[in-house]
Amino acid sequence: MASKSSVLESKVYDFIDELADEFDLPVIPLPEVYWVGKNFSYDRIGLFGEDREDCKEKASSGKSMFIVSKNIIVIGEDSPVHICEEATHCVHFSNADLRSRYRRKEGFLALNSIIEMIGFFGSKLQSPSRKNIYRAYPDPLFDRKEYIKFEEKFCFDRENYFIYKNGYDMGEKLYDAYISSEISKEFIRELLLNDFSKKGSVDLMFSYLKLGVLNFENRLPTQTQVSR
Ligand SMILES: [Zn+2]
């Protein structure tokens, strides 16, 4: 019988193929995929230091993770949502070559929000019913008063909150905009290939998405709508 890891691996590879077909993406180096089950060993996959601690923490709460430095996906829950979000991260990192950039200080919040947006978007393509658990929480940019109260009441990592709140909210909207053809396949393809190597370009893209094209609630009426 095939091991659980190899079954998950083929599910990841299938989804990587689907994304490549959908957005006409180049072939990427395929990741190794592991199931955090009985026989899982951090030593065997050669995971040490910060990555190991990070992965242990996530795995202990049933989360999944794409380990960028190793091109490894660790799955904590056998579900299409987990499999497809991590597979999308892998496709995104390989195509846009974000490996050297995603932990840098410059544009950190913006880039990581975009990374989570794309991960959430990818998972929605496979699981349209996925709920955005961050939707009910206050937006640090739009609901400032509620956000400050929320911060006083609960203890959490601010940067992490910013990244997932924005990433998942924007990912949900990106999906809605994509399936209603408001955003084109080409736009998604460009996002998946954008390496944001130009100074300031990631902050600009984040603002454009958050405040402009995906700002469904607060979008200003366009010129044509005003004149009508
Ligand atoms: Zn993610």
Image: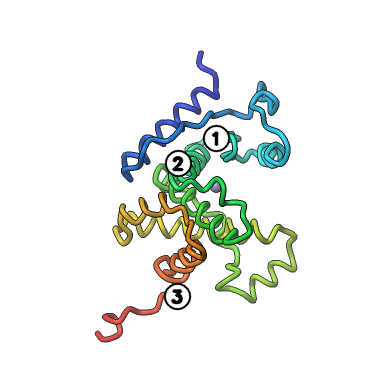
The residue positioned farthest toward the top in the image shown = 1
**Residue drawn at (43%, 31%) of the image:** 13
Q: How is the image coloured?
A: rainbow
Whole-number angstrom distance, CA of label 2 to CA of label 1: 10 Å
Q: Position of residue 120 (x, y in %)?
A: 48, 50
Amino acid of disc 2: Val
Dots 3, 1 in contact, CB < 8 A: no
* Above or below for 65 versus 44: below
Among the two numbered marks 3 and 1 on one chain, the one whose residue lies closer to the N terminus: 1
158 left or right of 195 in image: right
Q: Nearer the viewer, residue 123 or 103?
A: 103
Whole-number angstrom distance, CA of label 3 to CA of label 2: 31 Å
Among the two numbered marks 3 and 2 on one chain, the one whose residue lies closer to the N terminus: 2
- The residue tagged with tag 3: helix, strand or loop? loop
Q: Quadrant of residue 69?
A: top right
Residue hosting label 3:
218
Q: Nearer the viewer, mark 3 or mark 1?
A: 1
Q: Position of residue 220 (x, y in %)?
A: 39, 79
For disc 1, the neighbor class at 10 Å (few under 14, some 14 to 19, many from 20) is some
For disc 3, the neighbor class at 10 Å (few under 14, some 14 to 19, many from 20) is few
Residue hosting label 1:
71
Residue hosting label 2:
91
